[in-house]
Amino acid sequence: MDTTYTKSQLVPVQQEALSWKEASEWSLVLAARHIPSWLEKVDSGYLVMVPAHFWQEAAREVELYIQENRFDEVKPPSPSRPRYLKESIWSLAAAAGLLSLFFRPEIRQTAMKIGAADASKIATGEWWRAFTALMLHADPGHFFSNVATGGFVVVWLIEETGPGAGWFLTIFSGAAGNYLNAMFHGGDHLSIGASTAIFGALGGVAAIRSFKTREGGLQAVLKPVGAGLALLALLGTGGGNVDILAHLFGFLAGFLLGGLLAGVFGDNMRQAKELGLLFGLGALFSMISAWGLALAP
């Protein structure tokens, strides 16, 4: 260190005090450029002092160092749990508990008779069956399969929209899918189960993600759509009594409704509590009204 300088010949590289770590880093940067420097303790931290005739060069080197390392200030977001994890778990648990009630013998027979998506009856005006059929399942295996798959998809959708809008989209796209399916098949076609709503939720996710990535060009927009269609093919075209067209209609209804909600409301669906409450009440009222009409004499 050059000790020929007196204190009166030294000036601070900048007037704002630094932490010990920052001041030490600056001092090392200057030393690498053969610029002598000293650390001076002040009340709020440390000043990096240099000889007055080195000040301009020292200031330039420090500024270059700051610019080159500015990316360190932008830290990647730390992984965290889903924003609406608690709300999703409670609402899914409530929905699963409610759906399980329809396996009670004293309820099941009547519920199946008045609530299944009977195409001939929907065509003659009993549109509410498109809603009520979402709550009925053929057997416990069908029920638990929908809870497992649906739980994943609905949580995914709720992260995009918030709980209220997520359930609104799920229920209405499922009902729309059931209605379209009944109109397509006609006759004595009968369907039950929440899977149409699950694929509606999947279509909603694909649409909302596409809307959010639209500035990235056509390829960015099509990626979520392709992912949604791939999941539809993987999960919605199994064997047995799977109603493939109901799944497809549900997905398409969810995609259209999701795109509409994203275009009109954007992130307000997730951020505005009042809007989320309105959507949630709309979803709840739709199911209560549908069962009220189904039970009416």
Image (tube, rainbow, N blue to C red):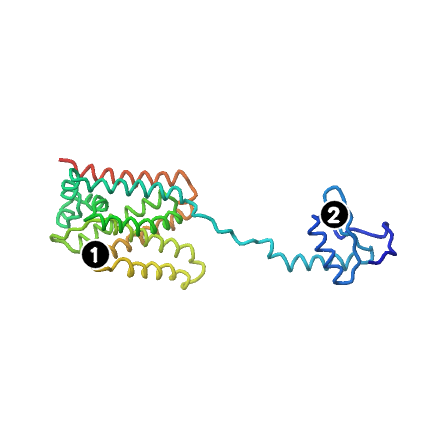
Crowd around label 1: few <14 · some 14–19 · many ≥20 (10 Å): few
Sooner in the amino-acid sequence: mark 1 or mark 2? 2
Using the image, tell me which numbered label, if any, was put on residue 107.
none
Q: Give the residue type that dot 1 points to.
A: Val
Residue at 26% from the left image edge and 53% from the top image edge: 250
The image quarter in which residue 86 lies? top left
User: How many angstroms separate mark 1 from mark 2 (CA)?
Assistant: 72 Å
Percent from the top left, x then y, of residue 60? Answer: 73, 59
For the N terminus, give its image quadrant. Answer: bottom right
Q: Are marks 1 and 2 in contact (CB under 8 Å)?
A: no
Q: Give the residue type that dot 2 points to.
A: Tyr
Percent from the top left, x then y, of residue 270? Answer: 41, 45
Q: Return the residue found at the far top.
A: 297
Percent from the top left, x then y, of residue 180? Answer: 21, 53
**Residue 162 vs residue 20: left or right?**
left
For the C terminus, give its image quadrant. Answer: top left
The image quarter in which residue 65 lies? bottom right
Relative to 239, residue 144 above or below:
above
Closest to the observer, 3 or 189: 3
Q: Secondary structure at mark 1?
A: loop
Residue at 62% from the left image edge and 56% from the top image edge: 70
Percent from the top left, x then y, of residue 169? Answer: 32, 47
Q: Secondary structure at mark 2?
A: strand
Q: Which residue is mark 1?
A: 242
